[in-house]
Amino acid sequence: MAAGYLDILRARHAARLLTGTLVGRLPNGTAHIAIVLFTRAEGGSYTLAGALAAAYGLATAVGQPLLGRAVDLYGQPRVQLPAAVVSALGMSLLALSGLGSLPLAYLAVIVAGVATPPLEGGLRALWPSVLKGEDQVHRAYAMDAVAQEIMFTVGPLLVTLLVSLWSPAAALLVINAIGVLGALSVILSEPSRTWRSAPREAHWLGALRSPGLLALLGAFFFVGLALGSITVAGVAYADDHGRESVYGWLMAALGLGALIGGLAYGARQWAGVPEKRLRVIVGLLALGYLPLTLTPSVPVMTALAALAGVFLAPAIACSFIVVDRHAPRGTVTEAFSWLVTTFGVGAAVGTAVAGPAVELGSTAWGFAVAGVGGVAALVVLLATGRLLAAPVRTPAVVTGSENDRNGAVEPGFSSGHKA
């Protein structure tokens, strides 16, 4: 297992791109946590915290596909770094102005969200120009998903540490400054500077003209909803137990479980159609969220959080391959940015719903939103099975432009294979 990942990291530029992207995504990956903690420290309610986090998520959802399409058209450096700087300035405005003016607070999170750089889609667009062969590219997808979970494991602990040492405002400032440095590292690299998207067919819908991609996005909206609701419910659980640190441990356990699951998933090559496998993985993911509604003691709850996260990274890694199979040619960054968008919208709705659920019901009600989200994601995948069974293209070897990932398929497929 380790040998395959090490081979990828030994490739020229690979470690730098992965690390830079991971660091650059830290502000986005921890934004909901940082906003909730900042709002609560400023005396705001759970509902306000959820609303601000939702505004950020919705703004990210609007900005990601637009910036992703801009990257496909104009290249990465012209878009990624300016966006990272503007996003950081938005969060800095929130940290420095506080909640004295709610319109200004909403404006700050909206600017930060809209300008969030599409580093995730950018990295996945770069992998084929850095790695050799589709096996390595798909293993890199799994490693990418694992790297996200490292961020989701370390990120909450870093935010809570900064809050403990300084303040929630300082946490916002530091996290976003680190994010700009990560984006800078990526766009100064040779692969990022020289990358160009494959030629695309002019169409106002762009990547969204693929029915299979739309089906996938619909399902992952609900996965995002589940994760967003856990953010708010976790804070309420920590408040119930009188220790702020409990929240960081719950989020870290969730990320740790996903990290373990992602490493195991990426350790082998999978035969068969990824769309069918994704349904099984999402079903297991939904099953893992349901026990959180029991809200037991902190040690047991931490273990349940780790268990709930085990199938998250595999679901994400498998979804990357499904995006590859269904995204129209020349929409590389945009297609993956839409995946980020569905997570953003889903997480925004999840945080917005979980806040009132906690205040009107209980902490268990907040976690129940996550369970409902997981089940709904599975239902969407089952209902759209026919659309997902017709990928745009499934060649066995990446050909043509080395930057065109849409030709890649999962290891185990043979030439001419039909889903």
Image: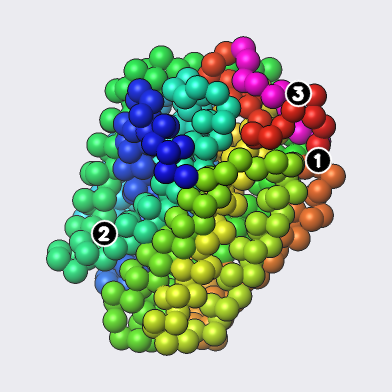
Circle 1 Cα neighbour tier, 10 Å, few/some/many (<14 / 14–19 / ≥20): some
Image location (x, y in percent) of residue 28:
39, 49
Image location (x, y in percent) of residue 110:
42, 49
What SS does tag 3 mark?
loop
Q: How is the image coloured?
A: rainbow
> Based on the displayed image, in which of its 4 quarters is residue 417 positioned?
top right
Magenta includes 360? no
Quickly name the residue at label 3.
415
Residue 83 in sight in this render: no
Label at residue 158:
2
Residue 21 in sight in this render: yes
What SS does tag 2 mark?
helix
Residue 286 falls left or right of residue 144: right
Quickly name the residue at label 1.
389
**Residue shown at the point (60%, 52%) measured from the top left:** 315
Residue interval drawn in magenta: 390-400
Residue 225 falls left or right of residue 409: left
Q: Main secondary structure of the magenta part?
A: loop
Q: Are marks 1 and 2 in contact (CB under 8 Å)?
A: no
